[in-house]
Amino acid sequence: MYRLLLSIFLMFLPLSSLPAAPVTTNTYEIEVVVFENRQSDLEGEETWSRTQPGSLVAEKDEMLVAGEKLLPESPLWEAAVALEKSGRHHILTHLRWQQSAEAKSGSKPVKIASESGELGGSLRFYLSRYLIVDLNLILRVSPSGGFFGVVGQEKEATVFRLSEPRRIKVSEINYFDHPKFGALVRVSPVKTTN
């Protein structure tokens, strides 16, 4: 009898009186820090090509521009400050925005660039079977002198490319590595309340 009364009472209990629980949507906050590596001893004996990037030009018309002025509370703020303070790295750009996770065909790349123009490229965030970040960046470094050209002639910049699609871990720092530069990417779900 007690169970029957309890069941009836719970059926008529107004659901609006219950506190709203946070609901996770398919909207995510994406934060990216791209930095240049200034440690020449880590570059090794590799030879870098001077090939000009081709695939980024085709995507430029479709790219979204995103980002906001970052505050010290952003999740990667401390990492960016520590990298810059070390003197071994230089922050090229630090962006944060919100974006929904859509299928690859419906997602648009977000433009990633430095103010100086030495860094360009895109980040595409999409949902396949898992959440994927497809990072496609190009760093152009002007030679500091010496062996790259004849005095009086314009020296050709060396181009470094970081192109990697990767399944990412949510709410963790994901590191994309290249000997000349790197990127830290953090993707976190945005929680909303009803």
Image: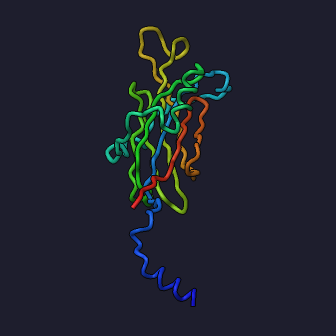
Coordinates of residue 142 in the picture (x, y in percent): 47, 20
Outermost residue toward the left? 61
Q: Residue at x 56, y 48 (%)?
A: 171
Quadrant of the frame with the C terminus:
bottom left
Quadrant of the frame with the N terminus:
bottom right
Coordinates of residue 164 in the picture (x, y in percent): 55, 45
Residue 79, relative to residue 166: is it above or below?
above
Q: Nearer the viewer, residue 49 or 193?
A: 193
Q: Nearer the viewer, residue 99 or 150?
A: 99
Label count reads 0
Q: Quadrant of residue 116?
A: top left
Q: Residue at x 49, y 24 (%)?
A: 141
Residue 151, relative to residue 137: is it above or below?
above
Outermost residue toward the top? 151
Outermost residue toward the bottom? 1
Q: Residue at x 48, y 85 (%)?
A: 8
Coordinates of residue 147 in the picture (x, y in percent): 55, 14
Residue 46, relative to residue 24: is it above or below?
above
Coordinates of residue 127 in the picture (x, y in percent): 48, 59
Colour convention? rainbow
Q: Residue at x 44, y 63 (%)?
A: 19
